[in-house]
Image: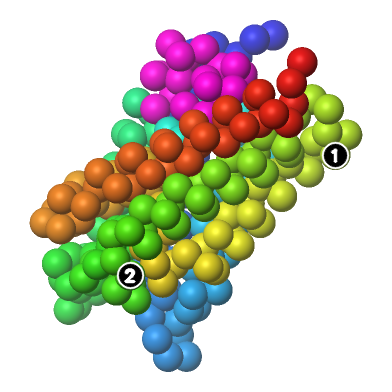
Amino acid sequence: METNTSSKFAAEFFGTLVLVLMGCGSAVIAGANGTTGVGLLGIAFAFGLSVVAMAYAIGHISGCHINPAISIGMVVAGRMKASEAVIYIIAQLLGALAGAGILLLIASGKDGYDIAVNGLGQNGYAASSPAHYNLQAGFIAETVFTFIFLFVIFGSTSTKNIHGGFAGISIGLSLVLIHIVGIPVTGVSVNPARSIGPGLLVGGAAISQLWLFIVAPILGSILCAIVWRYMLERK
């Protein structure tokens, strides 16, 4: 039986909520330096494991996009209708805001927490970059990393892939890999919703720099969809 639209909306909402809460939460709550901090690797795995968990929790309902760049890429690749993608993207944005809001409520429970100082795991470049990488580096990284991410997704979910049951694992691990390399550059987005949720609540530079984390991931996803559809898996 075909899953209805409301179920898909709910799945994308909760899936994106979990990604933002756990991924960004690992940076804000558990990513501190010292013996209690999980460090860069821990944050990278938190994002990747969130995708793995949600892939097997809601993948059968909505496909577990939890990322506007993925939904847009699916439309360009001919795997999804644009009208359905709009519904997915609305759910993803609302889920990201809800996840960031819950994270703020939790983080605010610690004395000394200041959203202007500690943030919510928002993305940034130049002075807002974790290692102060400039705009050009950030744009290239987000575009290329999203291209790679979508490349793995298209291949792992292809009907020609006999190992499709392991798609959630390969996709999640590819996100871990991307974070290991990309966290110092921008904190890693490759997902406009993941950036918009925390960015809107933090405000300031996080909002003024959001354009990069919307444009670059969408550009990377479109480029990958074109390459995949017309060069690699032509009918």
Mark 1 closeness class: few <14, some 14–19, many ≥20 residues within 10 Å? few
Q: Examine the rendered structure and indicate whether residue 59 appears above or below residue 205.
A: above
First of labels 1, 2 by sequence position: 2
Q: Which residues are magenta?
A: 72-89
Quadrant including the N terminus: top right
Q: Residue at x 39, y 67 (%)?
A: 185
Horizontal relation, residue 14 to residue 161: left or right: left
Query: Observer-nearest residue: 196 or 224?
Result: 224
Tag 2: amino acid: Tyr
Estimate the x, y position of residue 136 in percent, counting from the top left: 33, 59
How far is mark 1 from mark 2, CA to CA? 38 Å
Which residue is outermost to the bottom? 34
Horizontal relation, residue 158 to residue 216: left or right: right
Quadrant including the C terminus: top right
Estimate the x, y position of residue 29 in percent, counting from the top left: 37, 70
Which residue is outermost to the right? 162
Residue under label 2, please give it: 133
Mark 2 closeness class: few <14, some 14–19, many ≥20 residues within 10 Å? some
Tag 1: amino acid: His
Residue under label 1, please give it: 163
